[in-house]
Amino acid sequence: MSNLVFHQNFVTFIQSCTEDYLIRHANKGLVNRARKDLDKGAAVEFELGNEAVTCRINDGTVCTLTESMERWSCSCPSPSLCKHVLMAIFAYQAQLTDGMEDEQTAVEAPARDFSWLLSEELPPLLAGFKPGALEEAWFRIRYDEELAIQRDTLLTVRLLRQDVEVSYPEEPGALQALCRVEGAEAEILKAEALLRYRRSQGIDDTEAMQHQVALASYSAAAVSEIRSMLEQLLHTGLARLPETSLYQLETLAVAAHSGGLPEVERRLRALKGELELFFARHVRFGMPRFLMLLSTLALALRQLEQGGLPPAKQAELVGVHRTRYYTVPQLRLYGLGADPWETASGYRGTTYYFYCEDDRELYTYTDVRPLYYEGGSYDYAAQYLSFTPWQTGMTLSQLGKSQLVLRGIKVNRERRLSSGEVASLRSLPREAIETVAREGLLHRSDTSLLEEDDPRLFVPRPERVVLLKLSRIKERGFDIATQTLLLLAEGAAGDEVRLELPYTPEWAGAFKRLEQLSLERLTDFYALVRIEAGTLRPISFLRGTEVTNLKLDTY
């Protein structure tokens, strides 16, 4: 940083250090002592550097100030903000006024005007913020936060759950707000506090923020090239299509990747996979699926080519190369159970499901391993008993049955929890599922669930997992033809609920145990189920504070 730029930033910072702000960082007694020592004749000499200002007080103390309250030092032994730092700030403020007396007298101070924070034009307020900081701040807004607003020489927004505060000056400039947090997090908090304050005053910034964070950059030339190729496929017809089309699709997938079109790339590779099945005369090839992939991709490309889409829709069509995770200060989670799975592409894992009390949504954590590497393996039982990444004293089996608070956890837009070790976990006494379900957890009869459909054409449909209230298990049996364990249950409203659990050799022991258990004695309980291919796949049964994972706990 050049000497001139630093000096400008330093002067701005010193001018922002009002007495109210300094009292919040220290205390009123310390501020008064600093002023009294200066009034008694204490003198301070300043030496301006490229990244700091050295302040020498005539009692021999040496302080170092920067353009932020988070970075300072003092030769005195005090571990916290001391009177010497305050003396240096006050002395520099006096120097800036060319020796004029401070105007903080007994005269009543004029009313402060912070109306710039509520300007209807949001983009100018966010000028200078990094796109990533705005995106993360906007993501956090979906979670409730308690605010405390204080107006004096600064307008201070305190985020009570996070226990941080951001103080905005009277002059416009959100980036010049004062915040004790350091680094990139400070910029996020300045944007978050601004957005939350505006929302608390009845201002809806949704449309403006979508334009700020949802804009996607991509190659228009790649869109035209890919759409032209797909039109040729449609005109040629599947029966006359040469196998060289596979190479063309691979080339287009690479072009989509380099052109900033990850969702288009994914669709092209899916289309190529279907064509490979067709040329191999494989029984899994399906004409309806092939036509759906082709037509939806062609329609998405046409919309991108025509332009004029809302930012959120454009971002949906373009997609992202890698799911981004955002730090959420706190999540209160209620464990609903765990489900093991395996994919044809060579992955094994277990997904743990949670209900979030903060936004009444379903969250997941997935423990997964690839099997296609040499020596790759995944032992369900061993992994189920391994420890969580956030707390060494809790196993994953306990995690899925606990009620807990995660602080500093990273979450993506699909509400998947990151395994980053920076998060901290605190276990709470578990409430009964009947209490939690009454507070808003989704549960309905299976009839309405199976009739619903997701209208989205251009992105993968999200996993559909819900909680069903059941009265009892009426009967059970094993369908040899479909290799499925059938559980016929009675819903809370007297409706019939058919639960189906597909058999695989890996879970032979679990199925044998389920056939032996007296499930008919289980009454008035909840079932966590996944809606898959028009059927209900049970994951866990819950009653009171107990959770039974149907595969893992009977393995």
Image (cartoon, rainbow, N blue to C red):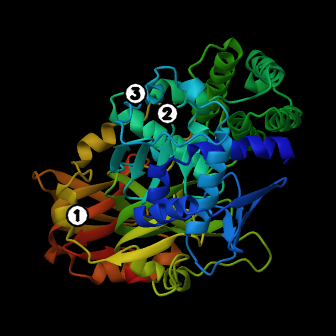
- From the viewer's perspective, is residue 422 above or below residue 276? below
| SS category of the residue bearing label 2 | loop
Residue drawn 32% across the image and 51% down it: 360
Q: What separation in Å lies between label 3 and label 2 (alpha carbons)?
A: 22 Å
Q: Quadrant of the C terminus?
A: bottom left
Viewer-proximal residue, 541 or 151? Answer: 151
Q: Position of residue 103 (x, y in %)?
A: 49, 39
Image position, residue 95 (x, y; %): 67, 46
Report the residue marked by disc 2: 170
Residue 318 placement: quadrant: top right
**Which secondary structure lies at badge 3?**
loop
Q: Are marks 3 and 1 in contact (CB under 8 Å)?
A: no
Circle nearer the N terminus (3, 1): 3
Type of amino acid at the residue the image marks with label 2: Glu
Instruction: Say what amino acid the circle numbered 3 marks.
Output: Asp
Residue designated by label 1: 526
Q: Determine which residue is flagged by label 3.
A: 204
**Which sits in the foreground, 468 or 284?**
468
Is the C-beta separation of discs 1 and 2 under 8 Å? no
